[in-house]
Image: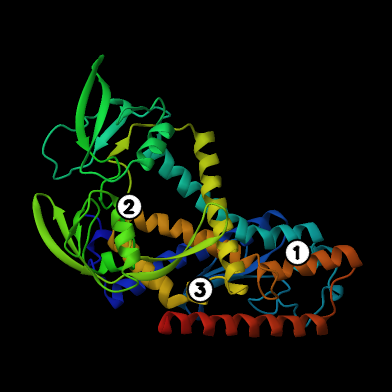
Amino acid sequence: MDIVGLVPQFGGAVWTILAFIVALSIVVAVHEYGHYIVGRWSGIHAEVFSLGMGPVIASRVDRRGTRWQIAVLPFGGYVRFLGDADAASSRAAVTVHQLNEQERARTMHGAPLWARSATVAAGPLFNFALSILVFCGFFMVSGVATDLPLVGQVKQLPFEGQTLEPGDRILSVNGQETPTLESFVTVASALEPAASAAYRVERDGRQIDLTGPFPFPPVADSVQAPSGAHEAGMREGDVVLSVDGRAIASFGELREAVGASNGAPVKLSVWRDGETFEATLSPRRMDLPRADGGFETRWLIGLSGGLLFEPETRTPGPIEAIGLGIEQTGAIIGTSLSGLWHMITGAISSCNLQGPIGIAEISGAAASQGAGNFIWFIAMLSTAVGLMNLFPVPILDGGHLLFHAYEAVAGRPPSDRALRILMTGGLALLLALMVFAVSNDILC
């Protein structure tokens, strides 16, 4: 039995919190393990590895003298190295200069600069590595489309007449040749919406002309959560027949109708497994990244579409899959940085910044859609956590790396007084950002 699949479709507070805790705990554990293992390899002794914050629930001390513990508050974690005064890696009252050379090298503040920098950077880098490996696994399991317009699996539609079959190679659409999958998508995207299209295909060594469904039908390839479609109980594979009583034949028409609603509820007629039902959805205003790096504001109901068929796929090799995983992780980082910049400049709404409540809601919704979606969400969350920790804010890993850069240039670390002031300022900034994000979760 798939335990993740037991999460109710609409979720509940308990399941939402549980999904959030599981996702965050995995991401935090990987992040902190990166600090721990690289520190250990560099000769820095870890006194405590804590998953969670606050009072300790369970703990044990390993043969190296590190205490591994689970704390009651599952929203974070830390590694406290020798010489640290607290979880934020502040310098202990006893300075490293009071220790002998061998003891000093085992402390976080007395180890060589390269060792300290590597240990700090390892946390975010391990988060990125987790994301890359998860995405790599998905590409190897699901495969990538071939360069040819070969039909893999045909989507189920309420269409009477001929249709494409698995194994067909599409030679042309409405008389326009399609030698590659890319050319097929280009040609199909330029067609005017219609109930059907004319295809010439190669099947079993013969060329066949047939009339099939429109290349981009109004089929739900996926249902985002949270969204109006998710709340209305729509599922992957649902076919939208009409919007507010007007029949549609393409996903583009559905997108245009939702955009024209200007946020007003839309009534859909939906076909699923031979039966038709009505669903009323409330669009949400979203800022979406464009290919040129900017953003556009649109009204969305949480459905994404695609081709009439799933293209035939091939299994990429490990090197190619890792490259695709790196590309996917890089795209998330790029989109996140672009979104942050556009929020700072006021180009898009600050409501795009989500806090723990919003992230928890997405966690529960992803878990309700199955293990695959939940694991994909964990990979995305891992990228986000790694990126956030690299911001040059005192108390975060990026702030510590900034201190190390100063030490490399100046030949000495910042003074204890300067560190206290900067760390206090960084903490105040993070708390203010957290309050702002939580207010977004409640008010936006």
Residue denoted by label 3? 353
* Quarter occupied by residue 234: bottom left
In the image, taking residue 271 as reference, residue 28 lies left or right, namely right
Q: Residues within 10 Å of mark 3 (few under 14, many from 20)?
A: some
Residue 336 seen from this side: yes
**Residue sitting at the far right:** 411
Query: At 36% from the left edge and 72% from the top edge, which residue is drawn?
Result: 361
* Mark 3 and mark 2 residues within 8 Å of each other at the beta carbon: no
Q: Position of residue 120 (x, y in %)?
A: 68, 63
Q: CA distance from mark 3 to mark 2?
A: 28 Å
Q: Which residue is mark 1?
A: 106
Mark on residue 252?
A: 2
Q: Nearer the viewer, residue 332 or 137?
A: 332
Q: N-terminal of the two: label 1 or label 3?
A: 1
Which label's residue is closer to the chain start, 3 or 2?
Answer: 2
Number of other residues with Cα within 10 Å of mark 1, as a class: few under 14, some 14 to 19, many 20 or more = many
Mark 2 Cα-neighbour bin, 10 Å: few <14, some 14–19, many ≥20? some
